[in-house]
Amino acid sequence: MKKLTLLFLLLAAVCASAQNFNVDQTVMSDRDKASACEGPYRFDAPAPTPAPDGYKPFYISHYGRHGSRYLEKKDQNSSVCAVLAKSDQKGLLTPAGKALLRDLREFGKVGDGRYGQLSAVGEEEQQALGKRMAKRFAPVFDVKSGKVVCVSSTASRCIMSMTNLTSELKASNPSLDFSFLCGERYQRYIIAKDFVDTTRSIVAPYVTRYFTDNFDYDAFMGRYFIKIPKAPAGVEDRMMFIRTLLCNASDVACTGEGPDLLKYFTDEERRAAVANYDVYLYGNFCN
């Protein structure tokens, strides 16, 4: 009797991998890709490299991230709305600033009661991943008896991602035997929080400097504020204010709902913002 073990680790942390591509060209040709890892996952890679002659897959260890979700926390929307609203009360928003505030408030309604949860877009992403996995690695799954061990972090979006992905594997071979694990004891090795907290403090000055050198904060804010706030209330600093705005704009595509918010960033601003976010990701998780 053939035995198959397939290990799934669904995590809330970001797993970034360096890719050899032109950031400017990518962002200019498809503005949604300015969202970095905050945007929806679209599989547009070339055909897979075939296995060498005489070889076939027999085991898969899959370590994946959750699918597209709603904003992780309510304050990601309310904090930037508060900055704009405070200036609006003083008559210090431009017409474009008023439009930005209106659209942000409208998008805030999209995530109400669903913050951090997997969206319908995320469900489709994970289902498609399961279908591709079953098709591409048919020898692994086309067995009379196989065991699939699934481990998830405690975040509901990760549990739901695991459920959607494995449902397609089950559909490909109903005889597969699935077991599901989730809890704090697994959280410790799925997400190395202590390591991330340490590297974040080390990398932070470099991320901030890159933002200062590459993103024209005054030009961006000048389009929306008659008088630019010196220290935006409710956010940590200038960089976090812009990044949080971009998170809202990127999440529209992740949910498939809400007004277009990426239009408030120019091509150059989107390029600088995604490059800055890459510095943050690679410095914290890939160094």
Image (tube, rainbow, N blue to C red):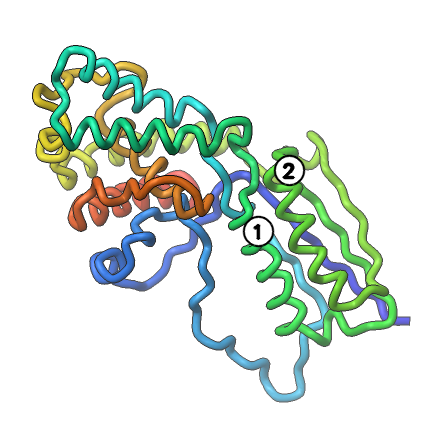
From this view, report whether residue 242 is shown above or below residue 148: above
User: Residue extending furthest top?
Assistant: 90
Q: Which mark is residue 84?
A: none
The answer to whether residue 107 is seen in the rendering is yes
Three-letter code for the amino acid on which mark 1 is drawn: Gly
Left or right of 55 on screen, residue 149: right
Q: Quadrant of the N terminus?
A: bottom right
Rendered location of residue 17, percent (x, y): 42, 54
Q: Nearer the viewer, residue 138 or 97?
A: 97
Rendered location of residue 90, percent (x, y): 15, 11
Three-letter code for the amino acid on which mark 2 is drawn: Ser
Check disc 1: other Cα within 10 Å, few if <14, some if 14-19, many if 20+. Answer: some
The Cα–Cα distance between marks 1 and 2, rounded to whole angstroms, is 11 Å
Rendered location of residue 59, percent (x, y): 71, 66
User: Is disc 1 placed on a helix, strand or loop?
Assistant: strand
User: Residue extending furthest right?
Assistant: 1
| Residue named by callout 2 | 153
User: Is disc 2 placed on a helix, strand or loop?
Assistant: loop
Check disc 2: other Cα within 10 Å, few if <14, some if 14-19, many if 20+. Answer: many
| Residue named by callout 1 | 64
